[in-house]
Image (cartoon, rainbow, N blue to C red):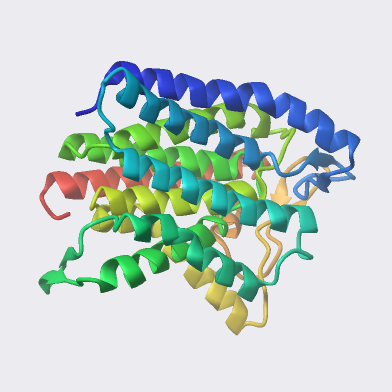
Amino acid sequence: MSNPEYLMAAAITSFAVTYVLMPQWIKVAVRRGFVGRDMNKLGDNYVAEGGGLWAVVGCVFGLYVLASLYRYLGNEPTYSDELFALTSLLLLTALLGFMDDVLGWKKGLPAWLRVAFIAPISIPLIVIKAGYSKLSIPFIGVVDLGIIYPLVAVPVGVLGAANAFNMIAGYNGLEVGMGLTLMAFTAIYSLIKGIDLVPQASLIMASSLMAFARFNWYPAKVFPGNTLTYAVGAYYASIVVLGNMEKFGISLFTLYFIEFLLFIRGLKDGVYKENFGVPRPDNSLDEPYDRVYSLTHLSIKLLKCLGIKPTEPKVTLTLISLQVMVGLIALTVNALGMI
């Protein structure tokens, strides 16, 4: 069973490690020229890259503290397999993302190579045979996937979530805000359902993201990079699998499915979309294309329709608000017994 004191100590560790290391990283990155242009602002505004690495490190230390407290004070290796699978997966995913960040935006690893590298990252989950092979599928019923679940379904889920979470990005505070929202609703759902480990894992990651938000919120001092987006997406998929809450996890990820469809729409129109807006002298943003190819573009249009100046923070808050609405709907549907 979970121990609130252990969780609090782990969450504080996760927050503190990220909060202490981030300013030091920003100084080093700026001094060494490891910076990227802030695309939603006029002029040449450059910000430290790769900060997501330290949010991941903070989360990993938090998970280590949780595992250590259970083993030494609780005298039991509670969740040991699951926790070490999560830390291994996080570090492997962050390594891939950091390689991409270091090699450079649009000049990093080719898309096919990223996919090839992300696929084996789910190996820690495969090793511990994470999750349950019996799934309840709407209109079909319970289906037992057997060995196909850990060997195929889990890697596909981790791969898909890691890449999908990277699609709604490019605005100060957006990725960290979306990640915080996903972790919060995952924790709430798992607490309602009485699922062990998932609330702890969600809140430890949320604590690290909260610390990172201090430096990534508008105007950002550091970018999360693919280091954070790949890691958070893969982590989210992992705790959904460990909690046997696939249907809720998929429903909470609705915006990312919509984003993927908009991305496909762009490809059909011959556009490999970018999420950034077109900055104007009054700090507002215009849509980059005539048609909507991303939820970020849709947010700009929506704000304009409401008579609100679409600044970067407002676009970010609009998307986070949409994610909150999706989360509330998913929880409501669950309360009605539909999930």
Q: Is residue 168 above or below residue 109?
A: above
Q: Is residue 7 above or below residue 110?
A: above
From this viewpoint, is residue 104 visible? no
Decide if residue 59 is on the left or right side of residue 310.
left
Across the whole image, how many numbered discs are drawn on residues?
Answer: 0
Residue occupying image coordinates x 24% and y 71%: 147
Image x and y of residue 284, in percent: 72, 44
From this viewpoint, is residue 98 visible? yes
Quarter the C terminus occupies: bottom left
Quarter the N terminus occupies: top left
89 or 181: nearer the eye? 89
Residue occupying image coordinates x 79% and y 65%: 107
Q: Is residue 111 above or below residue 39?
A: below
Image x and y of residue 133, in percent: 20, 64
315 or 204: nearer the eye? 204
Q: Is residue 214 above or below residue 141?
A: above
Image x and y of residue 288, in percent: 71, 62
Residue occupying image coordinates x 50% and y 36%: 60
Decide if residue 146 is on the left or right side of residue 123.
left
Decide if residue 16 is on the left or right side of residue 280.
left
Image x and y of residue 116, in percent: 57, 72
| Image quadrant where residue 332 sits | top left
Residue occupying image coordinates x 76% and y 64%: 106
| Image quadrant where residue 168 sits | bottom right
